[in-house]
Amino acid sequence: MLRFLHTADWQIGRQYSNFAPDDSVALAEARITVIGRIADLATEHEVDAVLVAGDVFDAQTVSDRTIRRLFNAMAAYSGPWILIPGNHDAALAESVWTRAQRLDAVPDNVHLALTAEVLEFAEAGFAVLPAPLTQRHTQSDLTSWFDQAETSNGLVRIGLAHGSVQGVLAEEADSPNPISPNRAASAQLDYLALGDWHGTKRINARIWYSGTPEQDRFKGNDPGNVLLVDIPEVGAEPLVESRSIGQHPWIQMTERLAVSSDLDQLITKLQQQPERGVVALRLEGEISLLGKQQLEDTLSVAEARFRSLRYDLSDLSLRATEEDIAALHADGYVGKVISELRDEQDGDDGEVARDAMAILASMLLEKQALGGDT
């Protein structure tokens, strides 16, 4: 029986410039450390090979240090790794791959499939038919040569490619680098390992996208996995098992607040999210002044708890309640101003009135906390 890991879209060297500096560094580092966990998983399950279906690097311009660190991270698995270039790291005449070779950074057990030719691993019982990208985009199906490719008798045939299966993925994914949905059948492949789609996806029993092992965008397409694949014999249907391996799930939340219980539910939802999560929170609706103070405390705690928390409160309106005004303990001139602002909340200048009340309330509450008088 042949057993291997299928992975893709490592995007090593990706930068997260839209995040806070400490978060961007941690997220970039996670793309390296997940490779070590893939190597450990390969060793644990005694696989015959690890197949990497393109976009190993995020760009051709990654540093020499990053190149060396990647191959160092693979060291825990001593069996064969077979890597192909994708659209981010295409095998140009001068590329990240030629630099890696000049640096002598590629271990002997790592096979760079930079040209379209069969790689046979006779002792392990399989052959790999690679379709490396030699430019960022192509309009032709680079897997078409698989149909005529000859391999030795008795070897499991595995295709390795990076691109978009036509007519199957979401419409926006049907881009350059097309792949026929019938390729496994027409080329008599036992399995076709694909990259480019960042989520785990079954096209049919013999064609799979593994997805990226470390999630990198807010998209619910089952990212953060590798595939453990068993093929009992030539022609047998593959047994494919998805293994979660990523550290940082990306979680997008949109919540509407209207009554106080909505805020309680939001706090509970935030507490239920994994601590290593990358969370984007958008709030809509209305919130009281006291509720806003509770929300700010909640977000402050959550910012320290999550790997990253970014929130958008632009569609959340403040609305003072009788309870808010009573809690401010304001009398005299200040109390009169607050009452007037409250009455103007629904007028033509309601937004200005609510903002002014929020500022005044914040000052009063802070003064109360310090033991001052209103």
Image: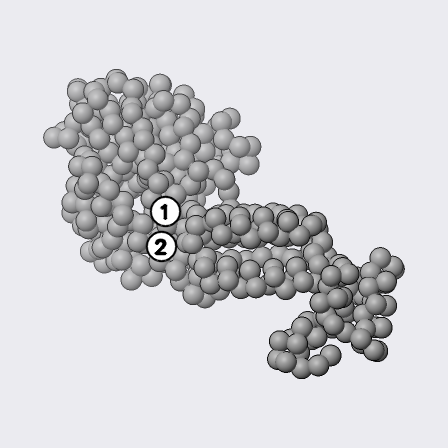
Looking at the image, is mark 1 or mark 2 earlier in the sequence?
2
Q: Residues within 10 Å of mark 2 (few under 14, many from 20)?
A: some
In the image, residue 154 above or below residue 270: above
> Where on the picture, by quarter, is residue 147?
top left
Give me the residue at 53% from left, 48% from top.
269
Residues at marks 1 and 2 touching, judged by CB atoms closer than 8 Å: yes
Type of the residue with mark 1: Gly
Give me the residue at 73% from left, 61% from top.
323
> Left of 190 or right of it: where is 120?
left
Q: Which mark is residue 246?
A: 1
Quadrant (top left, top right, bottom left, bottom right) of the C terminus: bottom right
Give me the residue at 50% from left, 48% from top.
251
> Where on the picture, by quarter, is residue 331?
bottom right
Give me the residue at 77% from left, 74% from top.
330
Label 1 element class: loop
Q: Which mark is residue 30?
A: 2
Q: Quick one: 219 or 289, which is closer to the camera? A: 289
* Alpha carbon distance from label 1 to label 2: 8 Å
Quadrant (top left, top right, bottom left, bottom right) of the N terminus: top left
